[in-house]
Image: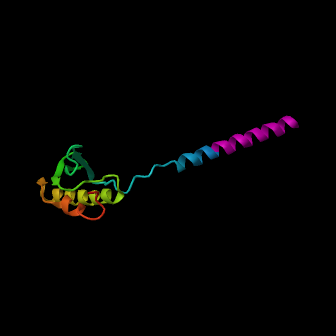
Amino acid sequence: MKRKLLRSAMILVLAMLSIKGVTQETQAVRTIPKWISEKGYWQVESNIKTPENFIVYFFNNEGTMVYKERVEGIKLNIKKRRTLMRLKKLLDQAVIAWEDHHAMKENEMLVATALKGSWVVR
């Protein structure tokens, strides 16, 4: 009788552990940050000696450069969420424009006008 009770208890404990493991796996889903675009990605090129000069490149998901801008006189802080969200918005606009015309645009001051404001470190 004790053996049957012990076996039943062991089966019950194992079942509970397996259920707990399955629920933890479903909760471990990684969320994607809001500043990551589905249309492409951006890259910032800068230099330590000249922190107020940088180049921003926008690429679509295929790796094609769709927009490039050289910005001078603004110090970019890419650790701020607002800056990342602005770059995402500009990336989406650049990719849509590229899909319409299939021509890369360059230095139209989109990034410079979007980044001027109180949330840019100067």
**Residue at figure coordinates x 81%, y 37% from the top left:** 6
Residue 54: say if magenta: no
**Residue at figure coordinates x 72%, y 42% from the top left:** 13
Q: From what the image shows, is residue 3 above or below residue 80? A: above
The front one of 61 and 48 is 48
> Total of numbered circles in the picture?
0
Position of residue 23 in the picture relative to residue 80 (left or right): right
Q: From what the image shows, is residue 39 above or below residue 16? A: below
The x and y percentages for residue 64 are 18, 47
Residue 14: say if magenta: yes
The x and y percentages for residue 91 are 24, 56
Magenta-highlighted residues: 1-18
**Residue at figure coordinates x 58%, y 45% from the top left:** 22
Query: Magenta stretch mostly in which secondary structure?
Result: helix
Residue 101 sits in which quadrant? bottom left
Residue that protrudes farthest toward the bottom in the picture: 117
The x and y percentages for residue 115 are 24, 60
Q: In the picture, which quadrant includes the C terminus?
A: bottom left
**Residue at figure coordinates x 17%, y 60% from the top left:** 97
Q: From what the image shows, is residue 86 above or below residue 30? A: below
Position of residue 18 in the picture relative to residue 73 (left or right): right
The front one of 74 and 28 is 74
